[in-house]
Image: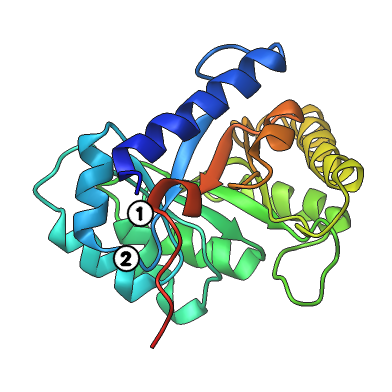
Amino acid sequence: MSSIADNIGSVTRRIQKATLKAGREPGSVRLLAVSKTRTADDLRAAIAAGQTAFGENYLQEALDKIDALAEIAGIDWHFIGPIQSNKTRQIATAFSWVHSVDRLKIARRLSEQRPAELPPLNICLQVNINQEDSKTGCSLEELPDLVRAIGELTNLSLRGLMAIPDPDQPEAELRTSFRRLTRALHDLKAQYPDAGPLDTLSMGMSGDLEVAIAEGATWVRVGTDVFGARPMKS
């Protein structure tokens, strides 16, 4: 059985190879280790292997791990799950990135509740790129109004877009989905240059990270290929 350190090495090499093949700058794509349902000890093993950025979906589970690992400096916590209004204060306080903002109400609450002593919260807008009923996210058509409004929220830094395309698409259609998100980000940056850095595309997972990198991903969110298969629930 591969260790977490071995897995991180393997995924890192995949990212480096895909980045080189796409003709992109080395280091322009970062690994976000999706650590939902994993233990603090699993994260310690990943940290020992050099991984510092972790993506969490479930708030209370994440807060428990943040507390358990509080003595370790330099961990970059990303919230990547659906956001309920009553959870925004804790998210705004505990995380440095949020990838799953899908409406203005949530963005406003995160901005209002971000502690003054912390830097602006990095956010990505989640786009329902394939308009799937089972997924959250705004539409591409809603993005301009959302970007314009969020650009006025002083405690947020609008970094870019996130999407989870339908993984059952043929590769050509998956590539098109990633490309649409990339084009949307470029259009927004040209239209709203003062809205935020708009330098981030959070897209691609264990099974499709090479395609996502070829189409412009800057963060790839990988869980299974880092930590192994999740244990079956009893």
Q: Residue at x 38, y 52 (%)?
A: 227
Q: CA distance from mark 1 to mark 2?
A: 10 Å
**Horizontal relation, residue 29 to residue 136: left or right:** left
Give the labeled residue for mark 2: 62
Q: Residue at x 49, y 34 (%)?
A: 11
Q: Could you tell me if the residues under marks 1 and 2 are in contact, i.e. CB atoms within 8 Å?
A: yes
Q: Residue at x 84, y 40 (%)?
A: 175
Give the labeled residue for mark 1: 95
Please state the horizontal and vertical placement of residue 167, each as a whole percent of the image. Answer: 75, 57
Q: Please identify, in this view, whether the residue under mark 1 or under mark 2 is nearer the observer.
A: 2
Disc 1 is placed on an element classified as loop
Decide if residue 223 is in sight here: no
Please state the horizontal and vertical placement of residue 212, each as a whole percent of the image. Answer: 71, 37
Residue type at mark 2: give it: Ala
Quarter of the figure with the C terminus: bottom left
**Horizontal relation, residue 172 to residue 3: left or right:** right
Q: Is residue 186 above or below residue 1?
A: above
**Horizontal relation, residue 22 to residue 6: left or right:** right
Residue type at mark 1: give it: Phe
Disc 2 is placed on an element classified as helix
Q: Nearer the viewer, residue 176 or 114?
A: 176
